Amino acid sequence: MLIIMKLSEFSSRKALTLLTGAFILHNTEEAVTMLFQPVESPVSFIHPPTYNQFLFAVSALTIAGIIAYLAAMRTKNIKTYLFISTAVAAALLLNVFIPHVVVALYTMKYTPGLVSAIMLNLPFSLHLLSKNKPSFQNHKQMLFYIAVGLAAGYALFALTLILARFLI
């Protein structure tokens, strides 16, 4: 018998599991669709990576995301869990808009990963952030975790692309 739960009934840890699954599906959508529809840069001074470079970077990020998920699920320290889960949710939430929605609106075309970003990452990221919010001592702590998560996520993405451009 299939049991379907409302998203609101999911705990923070179940929400992180859903978001991690969405992240893997999203990266798979990007990898598959980018092969057939390369990304167009909205500005001339940004040069998108080649397919092989992107595949290297998205694979490394997927592995990093799985490691972060495992670390969050195994920790007994609530602050560590909150940091990892909030940072991941914030990074994936921003990723919905930058680059996916922005590039799609600018080019008026589908951009690889757009569907899963909007249909999966957007609602699951928002849900996880809303589940985590009551566990924070104050808003400043949550905003700090979000800021660090965004900086770390985009730094990791930039480093993997730099490494990919160097190696491939």
Image (tube, helix red, strand yellow):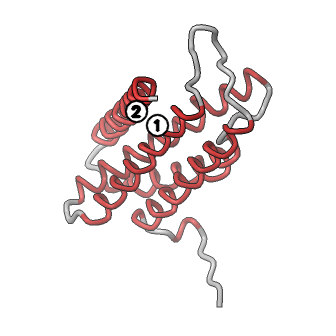
Q: Secondary structure at mark 1?
A: helix
Q: Residues within 10 Å of mark 1 (few under 14, many from 20)?
A: many
Residue at the location (52% across, 41% down)?
Answer: 93
Residue 153, percent across and down? 39, 36
Residue at the location (31% across, 53% down)?
Answer: 82
Q: In the drawing, does residue 158 fall left or right of residue 96?
A: left
Q: Residue furthest top?
A: 45
Marks 2 and 1, Cα distance to the nearest angstrom? 5 Å
Q: Residue furthest right?
A: 108
Between residues 74 and 128, which one lies in front from this camera angle?
74
Type of the residue with mark 1: Ala
Residue 111, percent across and down? 70, 34
Answer with the quarter of the image where residue 96 lies: top right
Type of the residue with mark 2: Thr
Residue at the location (56% across, 47% down)?
Answer: 27
Q: Residue furthest left?
A: 77
Between residues 146 and 130, which one lies in front from this camera angle?
146
Q: Which residue is mark 2?
A: 160
Answer with the quarter of the image where residue 39 lies: top right
Q: Quadrant of the N terminus?
A: bottom right
Between residues 6 and 17, which one lies in front from this camera angle?
17
- Pick whichever of labels 2 and 1 is earlier in the sequence: 1
Residue 69, percent across and down? 37, 57
Count all numbered tags in the image, as a single digit: 2
Residue 23, placed above or below residue 146:
below
Q: Which residue is mark 1?
A: 57
Q: Secondary structure at mark 2?
A: helix
Whether pointer 2 and pointer 1 mark residues with C-beta atoms closer than 8 Å, the reply is: yes
